[in-house]
Amino acid sequence: MASGQLVNKLQEEVICPICLDILQKPVTIDCGHNFCLKCITQIGETSCGFFKCPLCKTSVRKNAIRFNSLLWNLVEKIQALQASEVQSKRKEATCPRHQEMFHYFCEDDGKFLCFVCRESKDHKSHNVSLIEEAAQNYQGQIQEQIQVLQQKEKETVQVKAQGVHRVDVFTDQVEHEKQRILTEFELLHQVLEEEKNFLLSRIYWLGHEGTEAGKRYVASTEPQLNDLKKLIDSLKTKQNMPPRQLLEDIKVVLCRSEEFQFLNPTPVPLELEKKLSEAKSRHDSITGSLKKFKDQLQADRKKDENRFFKSMNKNDMKSWGLLQKNNHKMNKTSEPGSSSAGGRTTSGPPNHHSSAPSHSLFRASSAGKVTFPVCLLASYDEIAGQGASSQDTKTFDAALSEELHAALSEWLTAIRAWFCDVPSSQASSENTGSSGATRTSEHRVALSEWLRPTTVLDLVELGRRSGEWEGSGY
């Protein structure tokens, strides 16, 4: 195909502008244009000594016509190439067995046949037709297939549009649910904030009123104390008088001292104590309701997390890990952290209960707690629940994605930094957990030994056992 195009391009360069055919015995005249010898000679026959070039109209001499050997050789080579190409095409359309032209097409074998092949026993009983008829028949079939495929294309476009619409509806539902979650939790937070502010306002007011009541109590008792002191001083003075002076008005003095009574006012009004009791009851009621709600919420969340992660396949888990890794990095850069001179962060473990939405792999059960990535526990439980062999369990390490390994590393680093590297003085002063136990140095030493395993399987088992420590303030 490429050689044919080359021959055509070369042929365009050796076309005679008079006869518009390939140059025959090419000659060149004074102006430089090339013509067939016969064509230019016929033009010069009507003139005496000069004639005009058919192309540029320049006057040239008749006896200045000269043969162009270079063009002559080029024309011969082009003609040779054309002949070779024609012969090659003939060979392609010729039966290699009988050297006859192909005229027929065998429907059964899908082969081109010559006249001899058609009459042979190999194809005599086959469905054979002329090439042109077979091509026309298949053109009809092709047209039918085009129409069928065009209809399928139309249906596919409609299905695609419906699918895109469903995706849009799904994403809209996801966005709506996200906004609904944010709004509901914001409203819940607002209600709790308002309740907290009202309780604190009541307590602040009661404190203020108690202070004022104390001032009034002091103000009312101080004059009585002064009167009592004066009475005591007068009795002491009377006691030291001579007998005659002591006996003068003695009964009046003693009667006055006996009749003295200390009028003790109520230090805190009963109404204030009643209001304080009401505030305590309200706080206890809210705390009890919140504790029940929190316990139920945590239990439901644990079940929901396990169900969610068990339903994930390997690709889902990888996608989830990537998303949580990116979220963790974003939260890490956005949260202000205090660092020491050596560059080490002095704050506690990652806090995943901030107001900003966070969907970390880490589950923090209370402030200062870091628990195991729940997705690993779910996967481990699923493997163990299926009665997997020890060999199958060992392959769990290799099955984890790179992102989950990174999550494990961050989790282990956070726990070691938080539990094992805390100074003893600080450890002894830590807040107690739900059971009231204090994080002691013995606990830290035990936990340090507990954190020695580095394989994923050991860490999974470590995470499963982490629930045993939650009751000890961890």
Image (tube, grey):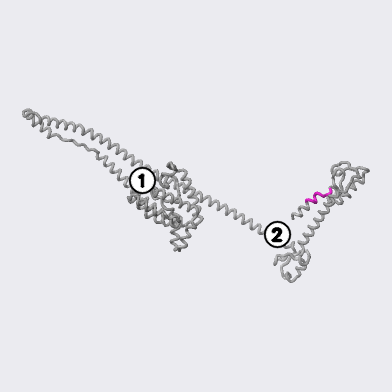
Q: Secondary structure at mark 2?
A: helix
First in residue order: circle 1 vs circle 2: 2
Q: For the point 86% across and 46% down, which residue is it?
A: 28
In the displayed image of the protein, which residue is found farthest to the left?
244
Can residue 199 be found in the magenta stretch? Answer: no
- Neighbor class of circle 1 (other Cα within 10 Å; few <14, some 14-19, many 20+) is few
Between residue 287 and residue 35, name the one nearer to us: 35
Disc 2 marks which amino acid?
A: Gln
Name the residue carrying label 2. 139
Q: Hey, which quadrant is residue 117 in on the image?
A: bottom right
Q: Which residues make up the magenta segment?
A: 9-16
Between residue 411 and residue 195, name the one nearer to us: 411
Left or right: residue 1 compared with residue 257: right
Q: For the point 28% across and 42% down, which residue is it?
A: 276
Q: Hey, which quadrant is residue 238 in on the image?
A: top left
Name the residue carrying label 1. 426
Q: Nearer the viewer, mark 1 or mark 2?
A: 1
Residue 320 visible in the picture: no
Q: Hey, which quadrant is residue 151 in on the image?
A: bottom right
Disc 1 marks which amino acid?
A: Gln
Q: Secondary structure at mark 1?
A: helix
Q: Is residue 257 above or below residue 120?
A: above
Identify the image quadrant of the N terminus: bottom right
Left or right: residue 305 compared with residue 85: left
Left or right: residue 140 compared with residue 244: right
- Neighbor class of circle 2 (other Cα within 10 Å; few <14, some 14-19, many 20+) is few
Q: For the point 22% across and 33% down, which residue is it?
A: 220
Q: Residue 22 appears at what percent x and percent y?
A: 83, 51
* Magenta residues, dominant SS class: helix
Q: For the point 82% across and 55% down, which residue is it?
A: 79
Circle count: 2
